[in-house]
Amino acid sequence: MVKIHGLTVDNESRCEHYQTPLDIIAIKFKCCDKFYPCYKCHNECEKHDIKRWDQSEFDEHAILCGVCKETMSINDYMLKEVCPNCDARFNHRCKYHHHLYFKI
């Protein structure tokens, strides 16, 4: 099972920063190879800067669905608002933070 680091508040990867019913993903950070619910959790727990994923790496399975615990590629995540495995709905407002994780 994938370990989710950070300030999580439940078993579906919600954290103290983002807790809506749709905040159910964790992102594997390229810089440390660890899954965190959000950039704020990463920055509070790590002592290094975030390294963003390049477009050429968007096939990397760097997104974890907190509901079914399956990973998906960055491409799959960015193209859909639901988990391709369990159909759980993701927070569509997360796209406003994509620039923090991905070079787009």
Image (cartoon, rainbow, N blue to C red):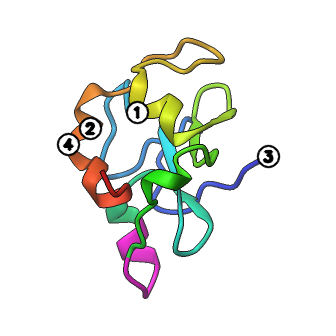
Q: Farthest residue in the bottom direction?
A: 47
Amino acid carrying label 2: it is Lys
The vertical placement of 74 against 80, above or below, is below
Q: Earlier in the sequence, mark 3 or mark 4?
A: 3
Q: Residues within 10 Å of mark 3 (few under 14, many from 20)?
A: few
- Please name the residue shown 26% across and 54% down the image: 99
Left or right, residue 44 beside residue 96: right
Q: Which residues are magenta?
A: 42-49
Residue 51 in the image: state x and y as whole percent: 42, 72
Residue 11 in the image: state x and y as whole percent: 59, 39
Evaluate if marks 1 and 2 touch, with contact meaning CB atoms under 8 Å apart. yes
Left or right, residue 91 beside residue 51: left
The vertical placement of 61 against 68, above or below, is below
Amino acid carrying label 1: it is Met
- Within the image, what quadrant is residue 83 found in? top right
- Within the image, what quadrant is residue 69 found in? top right
Q: Residues within 10 Å of mark 1 (few under 14, many from 20)?
A: some
Q: Farthest residue in the front direction?
A: 56
Frontmost residue, 41 versus 55: 55
In three-dimensional space, the C-alpha distance between marks 4 and 2, rounded to whole angstroms, equals 4 Å
The vertical placement of 70 against 57, above or below, is above
Disc 2 target residue: 95
Disc 4 target residue: 96
Disc 3 target residue: 1
Q: Magenta span has 44?
A: yes
In terms of secondary structure, where does tag 2 sit?
helix
Q: Earlier in the sequence, mark 1 or mark 2?
A: 1
Q: Earlier in the sequence, mark 1 or mark 4?
A: 1
- Please name the residue shown 39% across and 64% down the image: 41
